[in-house]
Amino acid sequence: MSQILLPVNKPEDWQPHLGDPQKHWKSGHSAKALAYCWQEAQGFPKEVKSVLTAAGNPVSRLEPLLILPEHKVPLPGRSTASQSDIWILAKSENQLFSIAVEGKVSESFGEPVNHWILEDSKGKQERLEFLLKKLGIRSDFDKTIRYQLLHRTASAVIEAERFLASHAMVIIHSFSPKNEWFDDFAKFVWLFGSTPEVNSVVSTKLPNGMPLHFAWVHGNEEYLKK
């Protein structure tokens, strides 16, 4: 992954960096809605800021320092990286936050772990063991949990460690009118002993003491028309 980054000046500049630039760049889909929403906001979009502000300190005072679209975080065991729709380095007074943002409309969080692992390989086992250790999850966890949530959360923690941030956070920015797939998100967050709600932040701690925050934000559905 290159350490030299180019500025993004308009929503269309996000398209070439998508996993599949043609397939994913469509009106009504999360990639395009997210790009237009965040590019126009030039910071936290209004609905995201509202949810963060209501969470109390230190989350309520978050200010973005860097916002990187389609940010890749290498993981062990397989060649593919965990690619966040957006990764943010943010600050709250003297504390840094590593924030992974996942945009959704009707897309799922990918395969459940028990399906993903069916094509067994040494690489997959190595990666799964790494993710579980990084997040402090027991090996007998509910394997109907969606794999994408597992590696996306780990990527936020990895980048927190890399940038010496004291907090990690995952934000699901959903433009779905029905908040589709929220139940899968909730099932995952339950692994950490927390019960999430739409438009709220829940916080927990990893075994190493790092605070880990989760938020589900209902996005402005007008961006589905872009």
Image (cartoon, rainbow, N blue to C red):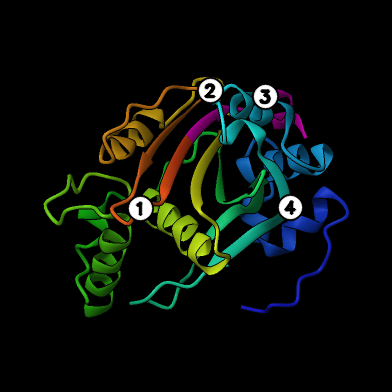
Residue type, mark 1 in image: Leu
**Distance in Å between CA atoms under marks 3 and 2:** 14 Å
Q: Is residue 92 left or right of residue 144?
A: right
Label 1 belongs to which residue? Answer: 150
Q: Residue at x 73, y 45 (%)?
A: 35
Question: Which of the marked residues, 4 or 1, is nearer the chain's N terminus?
Answer: 4
Q: Position of residue 192 (x, y in %)?
A: 28, 40
**Distance in Å between CA atoms under marks 1 and 2:** 21 Å
Residue type, mark 3 in image: Glu
**Distance in Å between CA atoms under marks 3 and 1:** 27 Å
Question: Does the magenta segment cover residue 224?
Answer: yes
Q: Residue at x 80, y 37 (%)?
A: 41
Question: Does the magenta segment cover residue 77?
Answer: no
Q: Kindly check if marks 4 and 2 are in contact, taking CB atoms under 8 A apart as contact.
A: no
Q: Quadrant of the C terminus?
A: top right
Q: Kindly check if marks 3 and 2 are in contact, taking CB atoms under 8 A apart as contact.
A: no
Residue type, mark 2 in image: Asn
**Distance in Å between CA atoms under marks 4 and 2:** 23 Å
Q: Is residue 158 left or right of residue 65?
A: left
Label 4 belongs to which residue? Answer: 65
Residue lying farthest left?
140
Q: Which mark is residue 221?
A: 3
Q: Secondary structure at mark 1?
A: helix
